[in-house]
């Protein structure tokens, strides 16, 4: 009996020491999101990934290790964040973010604005929208948020008229005037640039345009203005919003060094929005 009691006490003591040791180890690497010693940030491939490369470089100077994890679509970075496969993401506009949160019941929060990627209209067949022929095929993103954004852009360009008041909720079914009977075709956002030669014109998100080798400032024939409401953001899980490393990441991203990097490398195609 005494031997059993002594063994139990020893197991308890070892367990307590192990728990204390584990907690101390986590503290050494940082609390919360840094429990594994690094911050995993999800982005879409292309400009967001390039910007995060600069953020990673600056973070390393502060002793913060960042792993940049690129995705090829707009859905998975939020799913991965909600499922704790990544710690932060930086790739999306607020309207898209809010719509996806509601649609998938994701407990995610915006913590800061980042950059604006003005959506543009591109064509390999015309250099002026007035030259588009009757019934021209015009591509636009298929997801609800970017589809509405493209339709607003088309309306601003004079290609169509939407039902009054639809704005960010507009769909192709809300087109009330289409004088030249354009055929508006919804496609996967990431694929539109690759299909541009098969279309007469298309609205393309700036990150995908750049990834395909298009220059928004030189190749677009119509573009959103600088007052676009579609500013990109940094998102985290709600439980992580007060984590110190989140604020550290925000401060590094919104630094003068990153702003200068964006201005020098993207020639006005991407606008720092802080």
Image (spheres, rainbow, N blue to C red):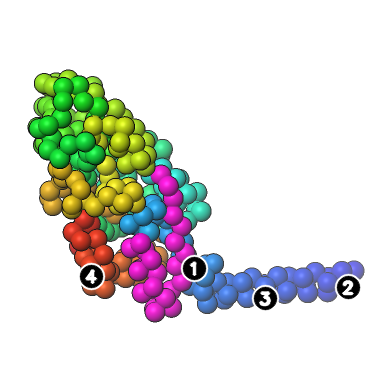
Q: Secondary structure at mark 4?
A: helix
The first of marks 3 and 4 along the sequence is: 3
Q: Are marks 3 and 1 in contact (CB under 8 Å)?
A: no
Is residue 110 shown left or right of residue 78?
left
In the picture, the disc for residue 38 is 1
In the picture, the disc for residue 80 is none
Name the residue that disc number 2 marks.
Answer: 2
Please tell me how crowded label 2 is: few (under 14), some (14-19), or many (20+) other residues with Cα within 10 Å.
few
Residue 189: name its quadrant: top left
- Give residue 217's position: percent from left, percent from top: 18, 53
Q: Are marks 4 and 1 in contact (CB under 8 Å)?
A: no
For the residues labelled 3 and 1, the Cα–Cα distance comes to: 25 Å
Q: Are marks 3 and 2 in contact (CB under 8 Å)?
A: no
For the residues labelled 3 and 2, the Cα–Cα distance comes to: 22 Å
Foreground of the two, 93 or 9: 93
Is residue 205 shown left or right of residue 181?
right
Name the residue that disc number 3 marks.
Answer: 17
Does 65 lie within the magenta span? yes
Name the residue that disc number 4 marks.
Answer: 260
Question: At x 21% / y 26%, what residue is drawn?
Answer: 136
Question: In the rendered structure, which segment of residues is drawn in magenta?
Answer: 50-73
């Amino acid at each position: 009996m005494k031997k059993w009691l002594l063994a139990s006490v020893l197991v308890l003591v070892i367990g307590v020491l192990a728990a204390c040791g584990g907690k101390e180890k986590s503290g050494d690497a940082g609390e919360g999101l840094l429990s594994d010693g690094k911050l995993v940030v999800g982005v879409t491939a292309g400009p967001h990934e390039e910007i995060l490369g600069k953020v990673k470089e600056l973070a390393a100077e502060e002793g913060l290790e960042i792993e940049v994890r690129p995705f090829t679509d707009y859905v998975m970075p939020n799913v991965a964040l909600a499922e704790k496969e990544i710690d932060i993401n930086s790739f999306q506009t607020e309207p898209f973010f809010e719509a996806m949160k509601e649609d998938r019941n994701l407990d995610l929060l915006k913590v800061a604005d980042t950059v604006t990627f003005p959506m543009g209209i591109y064509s390999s067949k015309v250099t002026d929208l007035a030259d588009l022929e009757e019934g021209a095929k015009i591509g636009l993103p298929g997801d609800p948020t970017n589809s509405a954004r493209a339709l607003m852009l088309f309306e601003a360009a004079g290609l169509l008229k939407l039902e009054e008041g639809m704005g960010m909720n507009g769909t192709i079914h809300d087109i009330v005037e289409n004088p030249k009977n354009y055929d508006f075709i919804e496609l996967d956002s990431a694929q539109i640039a690759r299909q541009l030669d098969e279309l007469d014109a298309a609205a393309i998100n700036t990150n995908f345009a750049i990834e395909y080798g298009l220059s928004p400032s030189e190749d677009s024939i119509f573009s959103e203005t600088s007052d676009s409401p579609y500013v990109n953001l940094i998102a985290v899980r709600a439980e992580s919003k007060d984590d110190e490393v989140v604020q550290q990441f925000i401060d590094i991203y919104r630094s003068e060094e990153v702003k200068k990097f964006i201005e020098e490398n993207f020639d006005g195609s991407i606008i720092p929005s802080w």
